Amino acid sequence: MTWELALDILLDALKDSALIFAFVLLVHVLLSFIDLKLANFLVKRRKTAPIFGSLFGLIPQCGTSVLGADLYIKKYITLGTLTAIFLSCSDEAFITLLTGWNERTIYILPLIGLKFAIGVLVGIIIDLIDKRELKEVEKPLEHTEECSHIHHHDEHDEHVESNLHKHLIHPLLHSLEIFAYVLIINLALGFIIGFVGEENFANFIQTNKYLAPLFSSIIGLIPNCASSLLLSELFINGSLSFGALLGGLLVNSGLGLAILLKSKEKRKDVLLIVGITFTISVLTGYITCLVSGF
């Protein structure tokens, strides 16, 4: 591995991590103002929440799965909704398919439709089985005009400081923590892929096309944006079938799983989610390949 390649990997990792940081920070600042309303909205619509989760997951950005995992850790969304987000998200895969425009780009339409539908279906089934309660959402305090007149100056300052911490400092610190975690993973996997080489991946898959859906799903498990980009590029250049691409992108949940691993309380759910998404991805990949032809 040359110094130029190492520098490129470092810069790519910094760029991808910075984009996730900006996305997560922006969304968390917004959420700090509407978190109670969002939680109430999802709690009241538990049966249909996977639909909204699957729609959200379609946003072509690494941060969607990260934010979904974060909301799940806070008990604002159900396991089914989180799984719907993971199944529908594809990081920057859609952008790669569009920017690498050729006769295969049209497949982005059935790809989006299938990922959304599978995410919704699986999410709803999981929520019918998993009956764990969501976080109880407290009602915000309502301050009347009469009460506001009896507030002292120091209480006002304390209120301002509390709002500053809630709406800026806490989201910033939380986003910086995620940035550091994401950067480490991006660097590690970037060097692994750089060492092995994308051409070697392509050659291996082309010589083992009947195992391609399985291998694509294994690659999709890698918690990094690079895995979705790799699968998309292999599909664009004709090295990967649509079924294998679909399987790999279904299980690809970006860094969402890595964020779940940070939470001791939710680590046991990681194996369950991986088991569900990986099984669905492999089966869907092979079924699609059989229907459309390898």
Image: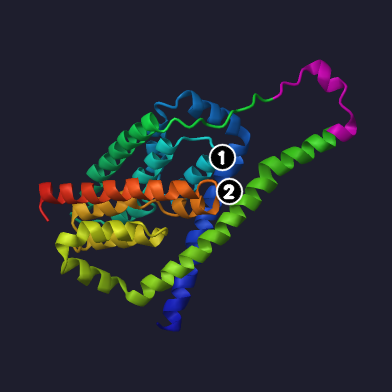
Towards the viewer: 195 or 287: 287
Q: Secondary structure at mark 1?
A: loop
Residue 149: say if magenta.
yes
* 222 relative position to 242: left or right: right
Towards the viewer: 185 or 146: 185
Residue type, mark 2 in image: Leu
Residue type, mark 1 in image: Lys
Residue 191 figure quarter: bottom left
Give the farthest residue toward the bottom. 2
Q: Nearer the viewer, mark 1 or mark 2?
A: 1
Residue 100 in sight here = no
Residue 291 screen position, x and y as percent: 11, 46
- Compute the Cα span from label 1 to label 2: 17 Å
Q: Mark number for residue 25?
A: 2
Would you name the residue on which mark 1 appears? 74
Which residue appears at 67% of the width and 25% of the height?
140
Residue 21 in sight here = yes
Q: Residues within 10 Å of mark 1 (few under 14, many from 20)?
A: few
* 73 relative position to 113: left or right: right
Q: Is residue 2 above or below residue 198?
A: below
